[in-house]
Structures are given as C-alpha cells and as structure tokens.
Amino acid sequence: MATTTLSAPTARKTTIALKLLMAVTGAFFVLYVLLHMYGNLKVLAGQEAFDTYAHHLRTFGEPMLPYGGLLWIFRILLLGSLIGHAYAAFTLWSRAGSARKTKYAVLKTAASAQWMRWGGVAILLFVVWHLIHFTIVKPVINVDGPDAAAIKASPYEMVVASFQLWWMVLIYLLALAALGLHLAHGVFSAQQTLGFTQTPKARARAKGIGNLTAALVVVGFAIPPLSILFGLVK
C-alpha cells in the first residue's frame, strides 16, 4: 500500500520533468529553425550572397574556433536536444498508451497527441534525408556529368538544382506541413508546461503564438523552393 502511495507522486514528478525537457529542447529547435529559415531566404539575394553566407558559417569564430567549429558546436547541441526531445516524447507516448488501457480518454487530446507523435517521426525522417542531401553525402540528383562537381562545390547551385525538381519541392512542402502542425501544437504545449496558460486570455495568446510561429516558419521556408521551381531564382 505504501509503495502505491509513493509511486503516484513520483510518476507525476517524472512526467513533469519529461514535459519540461520537451519544452526546453523544443524551444531550442524553434530557435534553430528560425535561424535556418533566415539563412535559406538569402538564396533570394543570389549566388554570391548565399555562398558567402554559407562560407561564413564555417569560418565564424576563427581563429578562436577551428574551421567549422561553431557549426559543430551547434550540431552537438542539436543532437543532444534531439535525443532528449525524442526520449521524452517516446517515454510520455508509452505512458499515455498504458494509461489509456483503463477505458476512456478525451478523443480530441488523443488525436492531437497521435499527430504530434507520428508527425514528429515524419519530421525526424525528413531531417535525416535533409542532412544526407545537403550536408553529409551531398548527392547531386539533378545533373550528371562534369557539372555535378561544380554544383556540389556551391551551396547555392546545389539548392537551385535540387528545387528545380517538382518532386523534391513536393517532399519539402509535405515536410513543412508536418513541421507547421507540429510547431503550432508544440509551441502551445510548451507554454502550457511552463505555466503561461493559466487564464482563458493567456491560453488564447499561447495558441496565437503557436499558430503565428508555425505560419512564419512554413511560409519562410516555402518561399525559396517555390521561387526556384517557378523560375524566379535561377
């Protein structure tokens, strides 16, 4: 009996800790996404501006940091945040599944949670592909022959060559749709976890911030590939 009495508060504490971990790591991801969106929009300024920006990301902090040092620090922080976010998400997912065996759960909350889980998995898969495409392997999928090396050497040329393909743009837009829905709910949930939704007015404001963040990110990220696909950027 004593064990049961003590386990409930402990479970609640660990659940709160996991939600806080999701909120903090999620906030870091939002910051990264906004910075990444700003960098992507530089493609509208032309090849020199975009390639110079990409180069400076690797030389930022020199000579105190080695070439690409800041990027690697950021990548390590992102990897740690990703592991923490995924661990918290899947642990809470598992607990919610066990609790739901009792009989009843609010359908709207359950549907929303299901979307966050599977939408998060879809985003994770896209991130893996995105890293392979533009950072790790850098396959040139639009041009064969001697021009491939030149395209691979220029971040701008690689982005333009990739998004001249309609199916690449479609994959990107589908990922953005998943990201937007994830952000709208996630930003609101983070504010809820941090105690910023105690009143109806605060709750409405938190939802507005979530929707605004999602809209800003989706539109900001969609502009470059659509501009390339329709020939506005060449």
Image (spheres, helix red, strand yellow):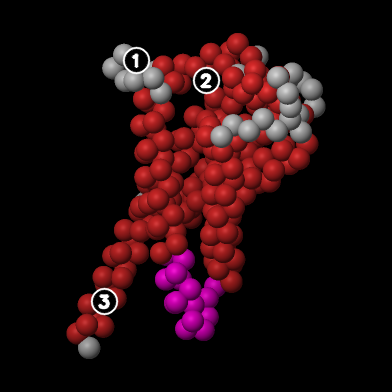
Nearest-to-viewer mark from 3 and 2: 2
Q: Is residue 198 left or right of residue 145?
A: left
Depth check: 7 or 43 in front? Answer: 43
Depth check: 219 or 165 in front? Answer: 165
Q: Residues within 10 Å of mark 1 (few under 14, many from 20)?
A: few
Of labels 2 and 1, earlier in sequence is 2
Depth check: 213 or 67 in front? Answer: 67
Q: Which residue is mark 1?
A: 62
Q: Which residues are magenta?
A: 92-106
Say what amino acid the circle numbered 3 marks: Ser
| Secondary structure of the residue carrying numbered label 2 | helix
Q: State the separation of the CA atoms marked 3 and 1.
A: 52 Å
| Secondary structure of the residue carrying numbered label 1 | loop
Measured from the top left, where is residue 48 in percent x and y?
60, 11
Q: Which residue is mark 2?
A: 54
Depth check: 66 or 5 in front? Answer: 66
Q: Is residue 58 left or right of residue 184?
A: left
Q: Which residue is mark 3?
A: 7
Say what amino acid the circle numbered 2 marks: Ala
Furthest-top residue in this view? 48
Q: State the separation of the CA atoms marked 2 and 1.
A: 15 Å
Measured from the top left, where is residue 35 in percent x and y?
49, 29
Of labels 3 and 2, earlier in sequence is 3
Say what amino acid the circle numbered 1 marks: Glu
Of labels 3 and 1, earlier in sequence is 3
